[in-house]
């Protein structure tokens, strides 16, 4: 099958299964979304996500403080899961996507198989990273605790939500076929 131009989809004439689809401006989009998420990554994890007031006592919580509190309470497994799913895996995913963009942008012909494996790993692990589930849990807690406590979103919640969205967009916009192409197409 000849290479397809951007915005063209190849489908099977028998079963209408999508065979190939090119993502226009894949590298530029992935780079922009990854860089945006990386810039918001520190504020998302270090700024307070929630401010809770119960009976006059105020507490602010960050993702990192949550991990430390779980560890301090000897909930080691849950602390490790939150640390991996909310901090480590999203960072590695973003760095991996950014590395793939840079390597394709500079037309690196080395290590194509490992870079393909990296992409498949990013896609596979990304499904198990609970970043978006964690954000949803925060929003549910805001609604559920409204009657018992005064819960207000912190500055970090907006950054955290933006990191979730930008990470999903970066992952969806990368075209892995660019790793194997020799011409400067689809950039």
Image (cartoon, helix red, strand yellow):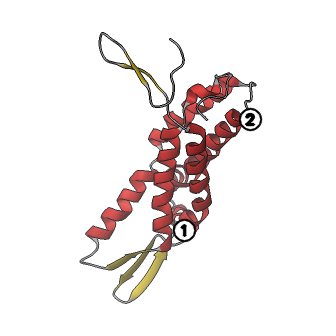
Discs 1, 2 touching: Cβ within 8 Å = no
Residue 116 appears at what percent x and percent y?
Answer: 61, 26
Q: Which mark is residue 137?
A: none
Q: Which residue is mark 2?
A: 106
- Kindly tell me whether residue 78 is visible in this rendering: no
Distance from disc 1 to disc 2, alpha carbons, whole Å, reads 40 Å
* Front residue (pair 27, 92): 27
Helix, strand or loop status at disc 1: helix
Q: Is residue 103 left or right of residue 97?
A: right
Q: Is residue 7 above or below residue 132?
A: above
Closer to viewer: mark 1 or mark 2: 2
Q: Is residue 130 left or right of residue 26?
A: left
Other residues around mark 2 within 10 Å, as few (<14) / some (14–19) / many (≥20): few
Q: Is residue 128 above or below residue 131?
A: above
Residue 164 appears at what percent x and percent y?
Answer: 47, 53
Mark 1 or mark 2, earlier in chain: 1
* Front residue (pair 45, 109): 109
Quarter in which the C terminus is drawn: top right
* Front residue (pair 75, 179): 179
Q: Is residue 40 above or below residue 127?
A: below
Q: Which residue is mark 1?
A: 65
Residue at (32% x, 66% y) in the render: 141
Residue at (45% x, 31% y) in the render: 7
Residue 87 appears at what percent x and percent y?
Answer: 56, 54
Residue furthest to the left in view is 147
Place residue 3 in its image quadrant: top right
Residue 112 appears at what percent x and percent y?
Answer: 68, 24
- Kindly tell me whether residue 157 is visible in this rendering: yes
Helix, strand or loop status at disc 2: loop
* Front residue (pair 13, 166): 13
Other residues around mark 1 within 10 Å, as few (<14) / some (14–19) / many (≥20): some
């Amino acid at each position: 099958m000849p290479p397809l131009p951007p915005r063209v989809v190849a489908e099977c004439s028998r079963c209408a299964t999508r065979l190939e689809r090119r993502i226009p401006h894949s590298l530029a989009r992935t780079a922009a979304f990854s860089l945006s998420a990386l810039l918001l990554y520190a504020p998302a994890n270090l700024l307070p996500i929630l401010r809770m007031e119960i009976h006059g006592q105020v507490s602010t919580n960050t993702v990192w403080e949550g991990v430390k509190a779980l560890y301090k309470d000897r909930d080691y497994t849950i602390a490790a899961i939150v640390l991996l799913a909310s901090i480590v895996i999203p960072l590695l995913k973003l760095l991996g996507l950014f590395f793939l963009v840079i390597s394709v942008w500079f037309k690196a012909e080395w290590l194509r198989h490992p870079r393909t494996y990296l992409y498949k790993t990013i896609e596979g692990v990304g499904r198990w990273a609970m970043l978006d589930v964690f954000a949803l849990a925060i929003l549910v807690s805001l609604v559920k605790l409204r009657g018992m406590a005064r819960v207000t979103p912190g500055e970090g919640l907006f950054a955290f939500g933006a990191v979730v969205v930008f990470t999903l967009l970066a992952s969806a916009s990368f075209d892995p076929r660019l790793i194997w192409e020799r011409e400067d197409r689809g950039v």
